[in-house]
Image (cartoon, rainbow, N blue to C red):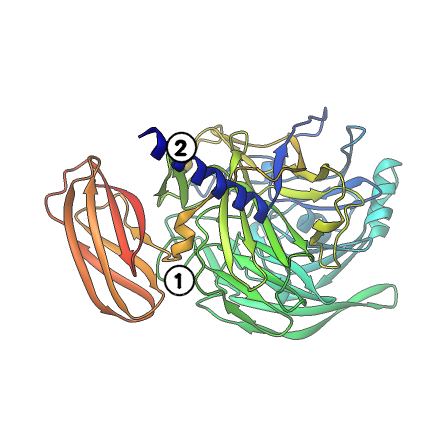
Amino acid sequence: MKYKNALLILSLFIHTILLGQDFPFEVKLDSITIPGLGGLQSFSVGQHNGKWLVIGGRLDGLHRRQPWASFDSTGHNNRIMVVDPIKKEVWKAPLDNLPVTLREQLSSTNMEFLQRGDLLYLAGGYGYSPTLKDHITHPFLTIIDIPSVIDAVLNDKDPSVGFNQIKDERMAVTGGQLVSVNGIFFMVGGHRFDGKYNPMNNPTFVQTYTSAIRKFTVEEEGTGYKLVFHGEITDEKHLRRRDFNVLPQILPNGEQGLIAFSGVFQKDRDLPYLNAVEIDADSFHVIPSFAQYYNHYHCANLSLYSSKDHRMHNLFFGGIAHYYDSAGYLVQDNDVPFVKTIARVTRAANGWLQEYKLPNEMPGYFGAASEFIPAAGLPAYDNEAVKLDDLKEDTVLLGYVYGGIRSSAANIFWVNTGVESIASPVIYPVYLIKNPFSGITLNEQSINALQLQIYPNPLEGEVTIAFTMPADGDATVVIKDLMGVSIHEKTLKKIKKGECLKDIRFRDLKRGDIYYLHLTVNGKTVSQKMIVN
């Protein structure tokens, strides 16, 4: 017995070494506070000479479910902030002297933003417009000269000379991502949302997903700028996403591109996507045989590329997710809770993606709507992917996680009175530490890439299971209780390759009890927890 145990321990140790060689680093978070900084979430940020320029976002936590209380004007960030994370100083200036359309857009939440050189580009954003006396998605692209505005805030000067604003209805997007590929702006996903938020879908708003990748450039024209559009790609099935993460990539062919990870909501069910979409200069495609189970909503993130072994590493810090890990089991929670998970998705040279859960976690239910602000001088490619091979020190400051929603519990939406969460005021420096035995734990579920989702969960006696078949064949569903006793077993015959939806009715399941559903395809099994109402 001792000999067998020793072999098991040795096997686990070797497995850990192999995982460490895949990414021989450890990720560590510290924390700092700056007096007077305050909390913020869903904001935009650029930087110059080590100082951050922070604009927009909200001062409160998770939006409330009541339309009259949600996204109210008292939560607007009506100031421009400049932050020095090294000297721990902050400066603030009001938006009062700016033109009204500029002032209203810059106090909105969830703008798309991107820094290129000394310019910060802000698109769209959702918030209350005193001019229109309603909540709107702002139809503007604003170009900000970062050094000029930082100087104005520091020296109490008029900042308006540092802003240019272009009106275009195609910029009326919130919850999307603005990124760059080979000098072309890509606005990926998002939606237009006009009117008062209402979780019961009562007619207080009009919502339209873009389901698109919109391409454009910004060119100088006289003393201002103009938009030049280069077309758009639309796909309502795969690009109907918002509040998600889009990370810059060096693709297996060596070209620059993007990956859109997860997001909400699938068209035929009110759940996050599990798949990911690769985007290059001309097209996109869903990445086969991959499922992302962690970090589904927008959170602080960054990508690192090693040209030596042609591996792309993507890091995600907390946030909100459909799944979390519990004692080694992957648990699906259809309330989509706040999580503490720090995860990595690594892409091998052959294009294969694999998800890993890091052993350390966020310091609480925190990370949703936060931003990762790279350390000044960090070596990076033109698309902002970090050059991993150029990090020579044993310990390197990658940057900072700032802002976001900090929740007091995993699920607060239906009990939210406005005090259960806050906008985080803490700054978390993130360090990369060389360590070949980092002990990163593998998420076995994503090897299977069956993309299993169960709904409703809790269930009422009938449940729909959605999963992806890697090839034509059979699938087996087994329900077991907490003691491991099989309660129900069913074989699904001759299922075609691709997405599959099956309704299954259960008998003899006790109300209030917990069960585990095991789906097996081609000898691989994914297991998820479910509760009976």
Give SS at disc 1.
loop
Q: Which residue position holds label 2?
A: 6
- Seen at 60% across and 51% down, the residue is 313
| Residue density around tag 2, few if under 14, some if 14–19, many if 20 or more, within 10 Å | few
Separation (CA) of disc 2 from disc 1? 50 Å
Q: Quadrant of residue 76?
A: top right
Using residue 454 as the reference point, say whether residue 32 is left or right of it: right
Give SS at disc 2.
helix
Quadrant where the N terminus sits is top left
Q: Is residue 295 at least partly visible in the picture?
A: no
Q: Which residue position holds label 1?
A: 267
Image coords of residue 65 (percent x, y): 43, 41
Rendered image: mark on residue 393: none
Q: Is residue 105 at least partly visible in the picture?
A: yes
Identify which amino acid the numbered label 1 is placed on. Answer: Lys
Quadrant where the C terminus sits is top left
How many numbered discs, if any? 2
- Seen at 63% across and 32% down, the residue is 29
- Seen at 36% across and 66% down, the residue is 470
Q: Is residue 12 above or below residue 35?
A: below
Using residue 237 as the reference point, say whether residue 94 is left or right of it: right
